[in-house]
Image: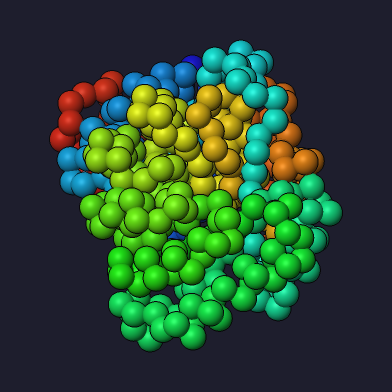
Amino acid sequence: MKITAIETLQWAEYPRLMVVRVFTDAGIVGLGETVDKIPGAKGALHGTIAPLVLGQDPLDIEGVWRFVMDNIMYHGYAGAETRALSALEVALWDIMGKVYNAPLYHLLGGKTRTRVPTYNTCIGFGPLQDYAAWHDDAGALAKSLLADGIRAMKIWPFDEFSEGSFGQYISLPDVEKGLTPVRQIREAVGQAMEIGIECHFRWNRASIERIARALEPYNILFMEDVIPAVMPDEIKAVSQRTTIPIIGSELLMTRWQLRDWLVKGVSQIVMTDPVWNGGIAETRKIANMAEAFGIPIVLHNVAGPICHAVCMHLGAHLPNLFYVESVRAFYKTYFPILSDFAPTVSDGHLTIPEGPGLGVTLKEEALHRPDVTLERSSGEGLAKGRRAMGDHWAVEEIR
């Protein structure tokens, strides 16, 4: 079997999302996806990666991945190239599942759990405005989430106060304002709702430690990305000075960037994103490495139905899973528009998709929407076989 074409799909209504379709000469098509910074990832996929993988065997996932990584690493790999490679690698796993008529979790070695714990990241989209809701009345939002079977939620109530000082200082009155939605949740539903605090790496250590001290009485589930991930020693110092577990970081790509984080013992929990970090196999390698250190893992998941399905399969498989992130404002609104995948949540857990591969099919009407932009790379490709790091092929249009 050979890869004959790679296609990207974007919809104007969902500008953060890029879906990838990988075509084979056996008629099997695999689905992949990445999210955010799409112009760069799209350019990397069609301009750099497609010439390397067209004509390759899609079932040689590890070999194809290594071949591409060797070549993109030659000029610095993290960022657009790795996001693009992640989307491609996901599609190759989908192809394998369809070839062998097996769900992804079976290909990975089977389940360690039958349902996947989730927290809701309170983003808004379309008619479901969870972001506005927690700014208006986080207690009412917590009740709404509990009614939907969701037992954990993540908000970021301190971000706005970082802007004036570039994260160098937060005043006591602003700390009190930031605590408002946390108090509302506890007053409305007590301990029935777990609360995670996203910090978006906006603070220095002095400021984030002031915030952490104020949050400690509220039994917070975690604080995420408290300081930029390029400062692991400072993050470790925070983790040692608060009773709240620290999570980091979705911004670290591949096992190599997570390795030193784990060796240093930077945080009590690690997080990674399978459509950013290199893909499904890379996520499993990162999780296995974390497990060796006794560290649980969170799967970052703020993309579309394909990423969500990937996280469900990985979540079912990985023994050291802490949570899978999910966004009800996405899976209740546009997932059913683009695909046949309809996630359900009950008692704080998501169900695991069935069917071959990822268990997701794009709806035919989604492929023909007036706001869709399609770009396709096809042909023989420029790489003959797989050779060493640093091989270079001239950039040319592939028809």
Q: Where is residue 114 in the image (x, y as percent from the top left)?
A: 70, 25
Q: In this view, does 373 lie above or below 257?
A: below
Q: Is residue 85 above or below residue 205?
A: above
Quadrant position of residue 51: top left
For image coordinates 77% across by 41% down, the residue present is 347
Quadrant position of residue 306: top right
For image coordinates 62% across by 20% down, the residue present is 111
For image coordinates 79% across by 47% down, the residue present is 149
Q: Is residue 62 above or below residue 277?
A: above
Quadrant position of residue 378: top left
Q: How many labels does the image show?
A: 0
Q: Where is residue 265 in the image (x, y as percent from the top left)?
A: 30, 40
Q: Is residue 307 visible?
A: yes
Q: Nearer the viewer, residue 273 or 146?
A: 146
Q: Where is residue 22 in the image (x, y as percent from the top left)?
A: 52, 34
Q: Which of 148 and 28 is in front in this view?
A: 148
Q: Where is residue 341 in the image (x, y as percent from the top left)?
A: 74, 40
Q: Using residue 358 as the reference point, say whether residue 289 is left or right of it.
A: left
